[in-house]
Amino acid sequence: MEKEGTYRTIKASAEGIYKEKGSKFLAFAFPVVSEAEVKSFQSALRKKFFDARHHVYAFRIGTDKKFFRCSDDGEPSNSSGPPVLGQIQSFDLTNILIVVVRYFGGTKLGVPGLINAYRTAAADAIQNAEIITVIERKSIELTFQYPALGDVMRIVKEEDIEITSQEMNLDCRLILEVKKTEFERVLERFSDLRKCEIQT
């Protein structure tokens, strides 16, 4: 189990394959953060593998891992989508899409055979991917007068905060990324300065 405020996902896309009785199962894993991204990868694969009989998929999005979907895409019910989703869950991943493209080899595999084929192809793609642990972060936007810069930057340095955008004029504006687990404490430190306008 990962620590609070972190989640596991894959760093980049990866592929896997499984063959049985002439059927080929090509698995593709992608890091995703939205349903729009899911649809875009699906449509690219449908164009590329337009002659394949099935495009089975499963995805899970969100750090709470509560948003997930899967589809058998014409295979017998629960024989393909759920086994792919099961691999995402057993590797404890989120923000991931797996599509398994099947080329039918002429011999039916039966439901147990399909479950095994889709599960194995999905697992192969995950094992070929680099799994990373991501620290959840939240944004804070600070606006303050230039004289307060020293105090603000001291907190940024002490708390090891990432600056994603900065404008330094008479009025300064910083956008910061703060670890979710430390967010409330950091927010309080900036509020105590009484020199900053804070937006979250």
Image (cartoon, grey):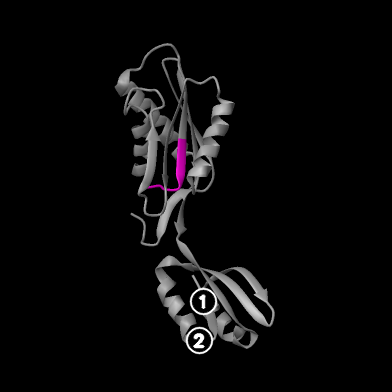
Residue drawn 45% across and 14% down? 105
Q: Between residues 83 and 165, which one lies in front from this camera angle?
A: 165
The picture places residue 63, in percent across and down from the top left corner, at: 40, 54
Q: Is residue 137 above or below residue 37?
A: below
Q: Is residue 163 above or below residue 28?
A: below
In which quadrant of the rendered view does residue 1 lie? bottom left
Please give the residue where the numbered disc 2 appears in the rendered image. Answer: 193
Q: Is residue 12 above or below residue 17?
A: below
Q: Is residue 97 magenta?
A: yes
Three-letter amino acid code at disc 1?
Ile
Q: Is residue 155 magenta?
A: no
Neighbor class of circle 1 (other Cα within 10 Å; few <14, some 14-19, many 20+) is some
From this viewpoint, is residue 91 visible? no
Residue drawn 42% across and 71% down? 182
Three-letter amino acid code at disc 2?
Leu
Going from N to C along the chain, the mark reached first, 2 or 1, is 2
The picture places residue 94, in percent across and down from the top left corner, at: 42, 48
Q: Between residues 171 and 75, which one lies in front from this camera angle?
A: 171
